[in-house]
Image (cartoon, rainbow, N blue to C red):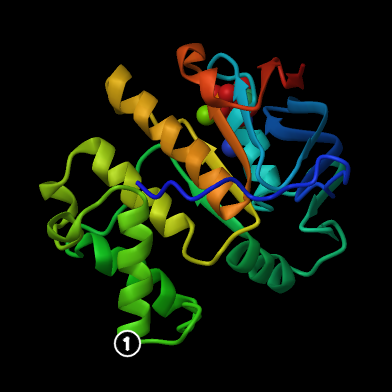
Amino acid sequence: MNTAPALPLDPALPLEPALSLKSVTLTYPDGDRRLTALDAVSLDVAPGELVAVAGPSGSGKSSLLAVAATLLSPDEGRVTVAGQDTGPMSARARTALRRDRIGIVFQQANLLPSLTAEEQLLAVEHVRGGAVRGGSGRAARARAAELLESVGLDAAKRRRRPHQLSGGERQRVNIARALCGGPSVLLVDEPTSALDHERGERVVELLAAVTREHGTATVLVTHDRALLGRADRVLTMADGRLR
Ligand code: ADP
Ligand code: MG
């Protein structure tokens, strides 16, 4: 794993949060009523900070990430990503913001079965329009290899397809893929639920290292409190409220 030094952050300078939620409320239709999934949730995450959100199933963790990812619009409140208020944005602007600024890692890696680890990253870059910093072809492959190397996949593993990788390795590919666009915000939903405890711990370690090296504002949600030791802050979600 790449062990680059931490970003030289000057503690005297308060960092503008890369992700900010202000009094966010989200409801879902529930018969003839509404179910409140997020109840006036506020959260600021600075660049290079790893915030863990723990809470039982159904407490609103995935809803929190969906709102932060601008996949769902809150009923009330404000979501700001990289200094941009997402509320007034058009759907197209929001899609562009997501592509350029937000990396998402879901519970299931959702890798394409026929592609090698390296190709999973190249496919994303292709969809992005060859935006791999530095163009297509050789430069894109080099960038993909570098990202995969940084999450601990050697040259042989980079050429394997998902079924030839372990669950932990697939999750590493998933994380590398989320980093392709150089996101400011990294949102991670239960990345360890398919892993045993030790592999889960190593994935959380990796997320902490990635957060430092890439300077992402990272939110990791999990129902497993045992995994929270690496986080800068641990918050608890219960019944749609964050504490
Ligand atoms: P968690 O990720 O902590 O398990 P969720 O954010 O998935 O929690 O869910 C929070 C609450 O919202 C739960 O009561 C869940 O049943 C409900 N919920 C989640 N998604 C939907 C949906 N699409 N439609 C209706 N209710 C939903
Ligand atoms: Mg969930």
Q: Estimate the x, y position of residue 25 in percent, counting from the top left.
A: 82, 33
**Is 70 situated above or below 199?**
below
Q: Residue at x 29, y 47 (%)?
A: 152
Q: Nearer the viewer, residue 148 or 235?
A: 148
* Residue 193 in sight from this viewpoint: no
Q: Residue at x 38, y 86 (%)?
A: 136
Q: Estimate the x, y position of residue 120 in percent, counting from the top left.
A: 30, 64
**Count of all numbered marks drawn on residues in the image:** 1
Dot 1, crowdedness within 10 Å: few (<14), some or many (≥20)? few
Q: Estimate the x, y position of residue 83 in percent, counting from the top left.
A: 83, 58
Q: Which residue is mark 1?
A: 137
Q: Nearer the viewer, residue 25 or 138?
A: 138
Secondary structure, mark 1, is loop
Q: Residue at x 84, y 50 (%)?
A: 16
Q: Nearer the viewer, residue 37 or 96?
A: 96
Q: Residue at x 27, y 21 (%)?
A: 196
Q: Estimate the x, y position of residue 194 in percent, counting from the top left.
A: 30, 28
Q: Amino acid at mark 1?
A: Gly
